[in-house]
């Protein structure tokens, strides 16, 4: 069969909660859907010159020659839905989700396919019940030709489409008497009644009441207390906007739509969960969701005993907060990467710099530093950007990549001190400034004090525990260093907060546990092949083990990355630690001690 291409407006629609409706009343739902097609959908599609391409049990695909007709048809269909649901229980209402795209389609007989069709289907999947979502190509064509408002939802990464798609929610001006009914599909399209709250200028989250699945009303106090502890722990993350308990607990005992919660509370992320009790054991599950798209970002579970309720609540709250912090930052980095380069704030530049920082390479560090300098130019008191710029300069010196090492040393220390003045109560700024200043010789006890303060402000701060481990190692406390780095790994087992495997390898080397040190350092190199200190310590470790051929092979690999084999700065305060490392490295280089 021959194929052709043409430009078309594609409308994709489906029934929200179709499986649930069919499970509750298969025959009745089927009859109501037939009536909906016969009495509303088909007449509206015909009125606006659409062609039904295909239907499924819960949806349909429609082609329009005019994108204006497609959008007008979608809005009028949604306008007609409240009357059809009048008198129907909320759980039994049929509600539609509609997505529209304008794009190139492949025509084969009566069928259509290609990205033009796929994008419409993906946008429909993003839509909420009762909503009409459109692509940027639709928005650009109709925004001045229809009396509707369009809410920009940003660029969305959709399945099987290479580039992000900018999506808009259609908001029409309606006069239907039910338009202002809270939660009605009509109110969601019209934007009447309570408008969505604007998102704060930093990441925002609401923690919904967890569901008590134990069947024991007496456990409500534990479930509610668990949520309160998590809210408190998240509130200690200074860069995160956290909705207060009094607002989120208004949803207690109610079925909720996470996207609706996001709009009503003005947050981008929602944490929800459940608690199930069996005897004296309890299982707590949680999931973090992007309220804009409904995407799941993280899910986890915790098992414990109710013998010490408060200890269990505290442990879970700290663990959840520690994992959510890097998960949210990673989500924000993805969001920022999708924004046009002409619309970047200092915060976006900062996020892009963090994305460029890992894995560590000379080019990546220079790119990250350039982005941070742009952020600082926008806001010269931006503590996190100042502190990470100091980290970049320190790493250029440490890895032997600085064009002018003394200039980079001076800039690193100056930026770290500026960061402390700008962000004296920000845990991340405190930790990053402390590790830079300690590396260049500041009093190690004072720098440990800064990190301790950071961990007091936020006990679930994974990078803070990592930096604390580094400073303890430099201070000659390898056992405490191992303990603190392992705490950071428990809090953030997947996301980067530094080079924890390298720090563990250093600690085991100083404890003369060479086999364990070598294992950690090898893993560190696999994880971050551009991290030059890992090669130096692995070469020293192999030399102390008498494996000189392997030690020299590691030195050869190091020379391919940097000309600087022996580091210019030795931050270990105990002379015996420095000499133990240097003696091994000299052996690996073929020098005699």
Image (cartoon, helix red, strand yellow):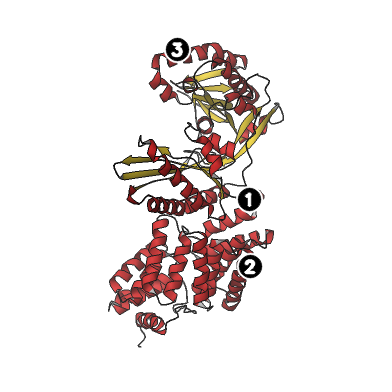
View extreme (bottom): residue: 593
Question: Up-down: is 95 above or below 350?
Answer: above
Nearest the eye: 154 or 218: 218
Q: Position of residue 384 (x, y in %)?
A: 58, 61
Residue at (61%, 17%) from the top-left corner? 49
Q: Is residue 60 left or right of residue 151?
A: left
Mark 3 nearby-residue class (10 Å; few <14, some 14–19, many ≥20): few
Residue 34's disc number: none
In three-dimensional space, the C-alpha distance between marks 1 and 2, rounded to whole angstroms, equals: 30 Å
Q: Secondary structure at mark 2?
A: helix
Task: Please report the residue visible at 63 percent of the width from the left and 63 percent of the height from the top.
Answer: 373
Disc number at residue 31?
3
Give the residue pinned by disc 1.
Answer: 341
Mark found first going from the N terminus, 1 or 3: 3
Placement of 77 over or under 152, stated as above or below: above
The CA distance from mark 3 to mark 2 is: 68 Å
Q: Secondary structure at mark 3?
A: helix
Residue 568 horizontal/vertical position (percent): 49, 79
Residue 421's tag is 2
Query: Neighbour class for label 1 at 10 Å: few (<14), some, many (≥20)?
Result: few
Cα separation, mark 1 vs mark 3, equals: 51 Å
Q: Nearer the viewer, residue 7 or 131?
A: 131
Residue in view at x 35 percent, y 37 percent: 214
Q: For the point 45% across and 26% down, which residue is it? A: 17
**Picture layout, residue 30 above or below residue 96:** above
Q: Is residue 552 visible?
A: no
At numbered mark 1, what does the secondary structure look like: helix, strand or loop?
Answer: helix
Quadrant location, the C terminus? bottom left
Which badge, 1 or 2, is on the more N-terminal residue? 1
Q: Nearer the viewer, residue 563 or 29?
A: 29
Place residue 475 in its image quadrant: bottom left
């Amino acid at each position: 069969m021959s194929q052709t291409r043409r430009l078309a407006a594609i409308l994709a629609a489906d029934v929200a909660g179709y499986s649930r409706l069919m499970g509750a009343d298969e025959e009745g739902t089927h009859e109501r859907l037939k009536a909906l097609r016969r009495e509303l959908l088909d007449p509206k599609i015909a009125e606006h010159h659409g062609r039904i391409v295909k239907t499924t049990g819960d949806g349909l695909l429609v082609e329009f020659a005019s994108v204006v007709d497609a959008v007008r048809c979608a809005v009028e269909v949604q306008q007609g839905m409240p009357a059809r649901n009048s008198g129907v229980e909320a759980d039994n209402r049929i509600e539609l989700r509609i997505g529209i795209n304008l794009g190139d389609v492949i025509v084969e007989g009566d069928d259509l396919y290609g990205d033009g069709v796929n994008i419409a289907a993906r946008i429909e999947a993003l839509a909420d019940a009762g909503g009409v979502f459109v692509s940027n190509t639709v928005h650009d064509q109709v925004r001045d030709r229809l009396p509707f408002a369009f809410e920009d939802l940003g660029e969305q990464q959709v399945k099987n489409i290479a580039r992000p798609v900018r999506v808009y929610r259609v908001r029409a001006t309606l006069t239907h008497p039910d338009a202002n009914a809270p939660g009605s599909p009509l109110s969601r399209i019209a934007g009447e009644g309570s408008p969505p709250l604007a998102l704060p200028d930093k990441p925002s989250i609401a923690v919904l009441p967890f569901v008590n699945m134990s069947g024991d009303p007496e456990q409500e106090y534990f479930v509610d207390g668990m949520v309160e502890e998590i809210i408190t722990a998240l509130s200690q993350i200074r860069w995160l906007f956290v909705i207060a308990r009094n607002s989120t607990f208004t949803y207690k005992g109610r079925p909720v739509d996470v996207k609706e919660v996001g709009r009503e509370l003005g947050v981008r992320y929602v944490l929800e969960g459940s608690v199930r009790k069996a005897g004296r054991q309890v299982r707590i599950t949680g999931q973090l969701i992007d309220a804009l798209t409904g995407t799941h970002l993280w899910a986890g579970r915790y098992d414990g005993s109710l013998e010490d309720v408060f200890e269990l609540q505290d442990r879970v709250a700290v663990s959840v907060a520690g994992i959510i912090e890097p998960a949210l930052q990673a989500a924000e980095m993805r969001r920022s990467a999708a924004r046009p380069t002409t619309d970047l704030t200092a915060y976006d530049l900062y996020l892009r710099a963090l994305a460029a920082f890992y894995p560590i390479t000379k080019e990546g560090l220079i790119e990250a530093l350039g982005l941070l300098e742009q952020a600082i130019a926008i806001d010269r008191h931006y503590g996190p950007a100042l502190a990470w710029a100091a980290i970049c300069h320190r790493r250029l010196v440490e890895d032997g990549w600085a064009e002018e090492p003394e200039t980079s040393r001076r800039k690193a220390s100056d930026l770290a001190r500026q960061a402390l003045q700008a962000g004296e109560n920000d845990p991340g700024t405190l930790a990053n400034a402390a590790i830079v200043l300690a590396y260049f010789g500041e009093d190690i006890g004072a720098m440990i004090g800064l990190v301790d303060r950071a961990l007091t402000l936020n006990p679930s701060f994974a990078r803070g525990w990592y930096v604390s481990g580094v400073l303890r190692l430099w201070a000659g406390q390898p056992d405490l260093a191992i303990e603190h780095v392992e705490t950071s790994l428990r809090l953030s087992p997947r996301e980067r907060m530094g080079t924890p495997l390298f720090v563990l390898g250093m600690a085991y080397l100083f404890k003369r546990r060479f086999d364990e040190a070598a294992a950690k350092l090898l893993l560190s190199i696999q994880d971050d092949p551009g991290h030059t200190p890992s090669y130096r310590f692995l070469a020293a470790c192999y030399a102390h083990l008498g494996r000189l051929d392997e030690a020299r092979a590691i030195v050869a690999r190091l020379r391919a990355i940097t000309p600087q084999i022996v580091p210019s700065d030795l931050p270990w305060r105990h002379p015996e630690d420095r000499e133990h490392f240097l003696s091994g490295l000299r052996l690996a280089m073929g020098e005699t001690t």
